[in-house]
Amino acid sequence: MAVDSFSAKARKISADIGAHYVDNARKLPWRAPPGGDRPDPYHVWLSEIMLQQTTVAAVKSYFETFTQRWPSVESLADASEADVLAAWAGLGYYARARNLHKCAVYVSEKLNGIFPQKESELLKLPGVGAYTAAAVAAIAFGERAVVVDANIERLVARLFAIDTPLLKGKAEIRTAMDAITPKKGAGDFAQACMDMGATICTAKNPKCDICPVQEQCAAFAAGNMEAYPVKPPKKHKPVRRARFFWIERQGRILLATRPPNGMLGGMRALPDDGWAAGQDGHATPPIAGEWRVHENIVQHGFTHFSLEVDLAVYQDGKIATDRDREIWWPLADIAEAGLPTLYAKAVKWKLKEET
Ligand code: SF4
């Protein structure tokens, strides 16, 4: 496409998406209305960290819980990491929660509780990557930053029929997003594009009949909207095996705190065979005795592998252990233990099996 016609198309897309947002913005608890006052940077940062790899619907209740319990970055910094991890339980990708807490401590202690405004400075914060830095700079501080999340990636790839497969295609998508991002109002524009991707230019069955940029859309013109963004060929995911240990005594089960580094680090969980380090699910039980093994009770998908979990059960009224990092947790309050989803699934399976 010639440079002039590309610029003209970019300007038209920018104006049409911006105009559409004024009346169609989603109302979300961390947002300010279009053109209104800027939202609280703490809210924007918190929501953007929560929204990585997670849907808006799943995030809403966590956001409300976090902001009620910790209404400022300083109060979040004052919380213990264990409390933050427990409150995060169920959202997944727990490294985010540990970095969230680290970042809160950093902003509170080193920056007097004030988030930096520039994308380049935000990038230096723990757990803040390119996407989050751009989103916070644009949405909370009005900086002209180019924001590209998965929804925007899909929208832009379709508008410009960018057929270079991801991940390579990301650079082209970013260039196109840069071209349509206005000088002023980059935050509203980014949120307008996120909304378009989430509600109109959806992965399956995009609603092109109500799309404000249908006339400008190259994929629509070619009738192959769902071909974009072009995905790389799927890699086969390896399967790992794990064994969890259910050790029960007088209405309580034994939980362990996972080592601070590594997968699900620092979270409370059932004792296990060290699967995160590549074990094969056949470890020796931590206590000698009569174990009942239930095979393959839970399958769980991680980004780079799938896990099949066996549960080994030992129930005895008199077991005693006093190892570090272990706690007898009342089964009646297991929902409050803040177990990661993988372990919560195993607990749910066991409790159901008993009924
Ligand atoms: Fe997406 Fe369809 Fe709009 Fe193109 S016309 S941007 S494919 S919703």
Image (cartoon, helix red, strand yellow):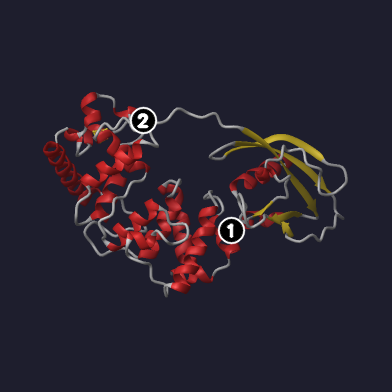
Callout 1: SS? helix
> Which x, y percent locates residue 108?
46, 72
Mark 1 is surrounded, within 10 Å at the Cα level, by few (under 14), some (14 to 19) or many (20 or more) other residues, namely: some
View quadrant of ligand 1: top left
Q: Is residue 59 left or right of residue 230?
A: right
Which quarter shows the N terminus?
top left
Decide: is 317 above or below 201: below
Mark 2 is surrounded, within 10 Å at the Cα level, by few (under 14), some (14 to 19) or many (20 or more) other residues, namely: some
> Which x, y percent locates residue 89?
56, 53
The residue where tag 2 is placed is 230
The residue at the point 60 percent across, 32 percent down is 238
Decide: is 115 above or below 136: below
In this orientation, does residue 200 appear?
no
The amino acid pointed to by label 1 is Ala
Mark toward the start of the polypeptide (1 vs 2): 1
- In which image quadrant can residue 335 be found? bottom right
The residue at the point 55 percent across, 69 percent down is 79
